[in-house]
Amino acid sequence: MVHYFTRWRTAKTLSHDDEQTLSELWESAAKMEDRIHTLEQILDAESPGWRARQ
């Protein structure tokens, strides 16, 4: 992702392919965040003290 930010700062614009890749990365990050949240909810229900053991 830093690569794309650096390219944007240099060119002040992103190519269509760069924009598409960045959009896909954003969507993937959102999906991963949802999955992590779901896993944390499952762990909270099944093993309430899991966070304290970290």
Image (cartoon, helix red, strand yellow):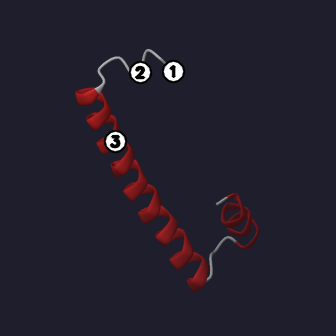
**Place of residue 29 in the rendered image (x, y in percent of width and height, measured from the top left):** 46, 56
Position in image of residue 45 (x %, y %): 23, 29
Residue 15 at x, y percent in the picture: 62, 82
Q: Which of the 4 quarters of the picture holds residue 2?
A: bottom right
Q: Which residue is mark 3?
A: 39
Which residue is outermost to the front? 46
Task: Tell me what residue is drawn at x 74 percent, y 62 percent.
Answer: 6
Q: Which residue is mark 2?
A: 51
Q: Give whichever of discs 3 and 2 has the lower sequence position.
A: 3
Comparing 42 with 7, the one in front is 42
* Residue under label 1: 54
**Quarter that holds the N terminus:** bottom right
As shown in the figure, which amino acid type bears the numbered disc 2? Arg
Q: Amino acid at mark 3?
A: Leu
Q: CA distance from mark 3 to mark 2?
A: 12 Å
What type is the residue that disc 1 sits on?
Gln
Q: Residue furthest bottom?
A: 16
- Give the Cα separation between the discs numbered 1 and 2: 6 Å
Residue at x 43%, y 15% (from the top left corner)? 52
Give the residue at x 76% y 68%: 10
